[in-house]
Structures are given as C-alpha cells and as structure tokens.
Amino acid sequence: MLLHWFDTAPRRLLGLIAAACVGLLAFGMYLQYVVGLEPCPMCIVQRYALIGVAVFAGLASARGQKGWWMTWGVLALVAAGFGAFVAARQSWLQWYPPETATCGRDFYGMIENYPLSRAIPMIFRGSGDCTAVDWTFLGGSIANWSFICFVLIGLALVLLLARGGRRAAR
C-alpha cells in the first residue's frame, strides 16, 4: 500500500516530506526557545539543510509536471544528503570527542561583531562545543536523530525518484 503512494501520489508524498521537515524545524525551535538548548553551528547547518529539503520538496509538490517534481526532488535529495553528512559528522564527534573540543566561534557573536560577508563563512566553520550531548531520546542525541531523519527522507526521495523514472521509461 505504501509503495502505491510512490506511484500514484508523488506530489502528496513530497508535500508530506516538506511538512515533516517543517515539523522537525518547529521541534528544534521548541528545544531552543522552550527547553533552553543552544544549538551549535553544526545544528544550525542541519537546520539549513532541513529548510532546503522543505523548500525543494514543497516546490516539487507544487506542480504535477513530472520534470518539475523530479528536478526539485533531486535537489531535495542533495540537501538531505548534505544534512545527513553533517549529522553523521556531529554524531562521530559526540562519540569520539577530540581532546580540544572546538567548532569555532559563537554564531550570534559572529553576526553581531562581523559584517555579514565575513560572518556567513564563519557560521559554516562552526563555533562552540559540537561534541556536547545536552538532550537524548531513547539513547540517541539530537545529531543521531537528525541523521536518522535525513536518511529516511533521503531513502523516500530515492525510492520516489527511482519509481518515477522507471515509470517514465515504460
């Protein structure tokens, strides 16, 4: 039944992926503003990747033309792969922390003290302690769960694109 959605309702599935990303972003905001957890720069980069997946999947679901949704779906897949890579790297750092834990400068300090043209590259270098595990659920850190979510989204996109491409070849 679930595979039926990949064939008959790719736009609906892409819309669900976009909605799931928005939900994950909302949960991140909850953890930051309600629970009081400060995101590290790797977390912020993962948020950017989630925003990318949400925007690309949302655009893919906006029109029914196959070339349109497949193009935006590929871009969503690239963003999900990037997010999974960053989450995997952060998970690795949490499991095997280096002797000197550093990811660079503080995000908000960079924005306040540097012009945007210098601050943006610094953001992607990171700041703070990305090895800290401040929150866990079922034994997994935020980075671990983020990796799992990016991989599941990526697998859904791969399956969607493969089935869409195979259907076009018929």
Image (tube, rainbow, N blue to C red):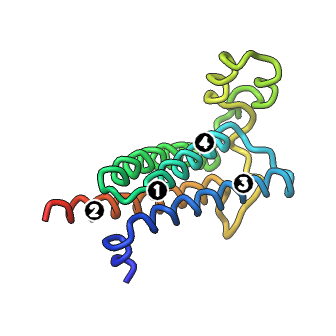
Looking at the picture, which amino acid does disc 3 mark? Gly
> Residue at horizontal 59%, vertical 47%?
51
Front one among 49 and 18: 18
Q: CA distance from mark 3 to mark 2?
A: 32 Å
| Secondary structure of the residue carrying numbered label 1 | helix
Q: CA distance from mark 3 to mark 4?
A: 12 Å
In the displayed orientation, state which residue is furthest to the bottom: 1
Which badge, 4 or 1, comes first in the chain's sequence? 4
Which badge, 4 or 2, comes first in the chain's sequence? 4
Front one among 18 and 141: 18
> Residue at horizontal 86%, vertical 52%?
36
Residue 28's label in the rendered image is 3
Residue 48's label in the rendered image is 4
Q: Is residue 110 above or below residue 1?
A: above
| Secondary structure of the residue carrying numbered label 2 | helix
Looking at the picture, which amino acid does disc 1 mark? Ala
In the displayed orientation, state which residue is furthest to the left: 170
- Residue 69 drawn at (x, y percent): 37, 54
Q: CA distance from mark 3 to mark 1?
A: 26 Å
Front one among 7 and 109: 7
| Secondary structure of the residue carrying numbered label 3 | helix
- The residue beneath circle 1 is 62
Q: If the image is split into quadrants, where does the C terminus sit? A: bottom left
- Residue 122 drawn at (x, y percent): 66, 23
